[in-house]
Image (spheres, rainbow, N blue to C red):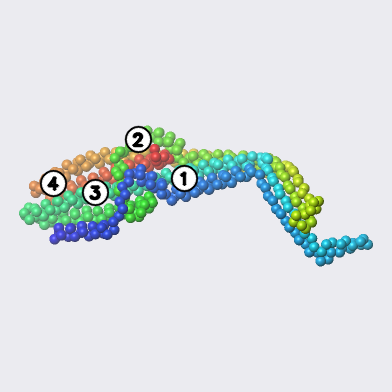
Amino acid sequence: MIHKSIKLSCLTFLVPGLLYAQDVKKLSLQEAIALGIENSKNLKLSQNKIDRAVAKLNMVKDNVLPTAKASFLYNHAEIPTNTLSIGDADPIKLPKRADAFVGTAAVEELIYGGGKLRYAEESTRLLTDVANLDADKDKEEISYAIINTCYSLFKVLQSKKVIAQNLESIASQLKQSQRFFEQGIVTKNDVLRFQLQQANISLTDMEAENNRKIINYNFDILLGLNENTQIEIADPTKDLKTIGPLSNYLDMGVASRQELKQLDLQNKVADVNIKSVKANTLPTVGVGANLYYINPNGSFIPSANQYIMPVTIGANVSWNIGNLWTNKHKVTDARIQQKELVIQKDIFSDQVKTEINRNYQNYQLALNKISVLETSIAQATENDKLLASKYKNNVASAIDRIDAETLLYQAKINLELARADAGLAYYTLLKSTGKISQ
């Protein structure tokens, strides 16, 4: 009956798989990162922010171009009372109606504005660079999210492999205990213990499969794949990296962290802002030309000498002298804002160093855990073989046999998890330096 129920259970699990066939996609870690970056909606949003910054820069550049405008006006007047008498003078006769055409065209150019246009362009250019760094930071965050999910999926898949081996082994032990029971060597209680152990491992396998489905679905969304795609990850723990001195990573972090670069750029923006505020005390100089067309004749195309077209050319100089004594507080405020950025960078630099040191120590700890677990697996394997021999010879109990086997497979799972944790710890260290792609 037990064998039949196992076969029936297998069919139950196989049927849904046949009915709902899934696409299987095999990916390496680097392929997953490339695919995720290519399909990332967040990166598309970051690129849109860059495009907006570039558009603003172009708009600021347009401010240095001369301005030009033209207008044309037509007026028609009806004059019901067209006779005007003033004192004893002869009355003035006005027409009953009048038409007039008036046109203007003007061109103006700012020759000198205290450098404010140049400062505005420089400031906007720096803010465009800040937007590019934002995109770089988003790319790092997305890459790390993909790496994190990749290792999570790999851990579940490796755990399932070990659980499958454990189930296969416990099935063999169950058959052996049933045979011993039939021969009168062990009690029914021993058989029940193996059956209970098999049930517990099956529950663990069900939980692992549930976690795999959740992580796999999230990974599909993250990579922009069809939500029914089943992902298989190539072993990302084959070549665990050796690391150099801590000082190397600290130097990389100070040089590469996007946040520190952004604070440097914002400091430059603040410096430009100070210059722009100071420029308020300087005069502005502009030139312009105006063309007027005045046609009171009433005809759209008048006869000669019935319209005038004066042209004026001029220059203007303006100077808000009051800014000489009211602008100093604005300059002081701009300098205080710049000083705040310098302090913020010092604080964040310390945070970066602390983060890098923590991740550096965590990676070394992860490598040391692997060494210890490899030793424990060798010990657990030897213990399992010894208890297997003793159980066959009816020297050890079923509990001892199960405990030895549980210790071995738990050690194997722990090693796979430790390898994955070490790989993720390495990329966490790289992320804290600002360059996952190192």
Residue occupied by mark 2 = 243
In primary-sequence order, the first of circles 4 and 3 is: 3
In the drawing, does residue 132 fall left or right of residue 99?
A: left
Q: Is residue 415 among what the camera can see?
A: yes
The nearer-to-camera label among 4 and 2 is: 2
Give whichever of 30, 310 is nearer the camera: 310
In the drawing, does residue 123 fall left or right of residue 382?
A: right
In primary-sequence order, the first of circles 4 and 1 is: 1
Give whichever of 352, 285 is nearer the camera: 285
Give whichever of 340, 252 is nearer the camera: 252
Residue occupied by mark 3 = 161
Quarter in which the C terminus is drawn:
top left
Using the numbered discs, state the Cα–Cα distance from disc 2 to disc 1 in whole angstroms.
Answer: 28 Å
Position of residue 145 measured from the top left corner of the image (x, y, whole percent): 38, 47
The nearer-to-camera label among 4 and 3 is: 3
Tell me which residue sits at (54%, 41%) in the image: 126
Amino acid of disc 3: Lys
Using the numbered discs, state the Cα–Cα distance from disc 4 to disc 3 in whole angstroms.
Answer: 22 Å
The nearer-to-camera label among 4 and 1 is: 1
Using the numbered discs, state the Cα–Cα distance from disc 4 to disc 2 in whole angstroms.
Answer: 41 Å
Amino acid of disc 4: Ala
Residue occupied by mark 4 = 388
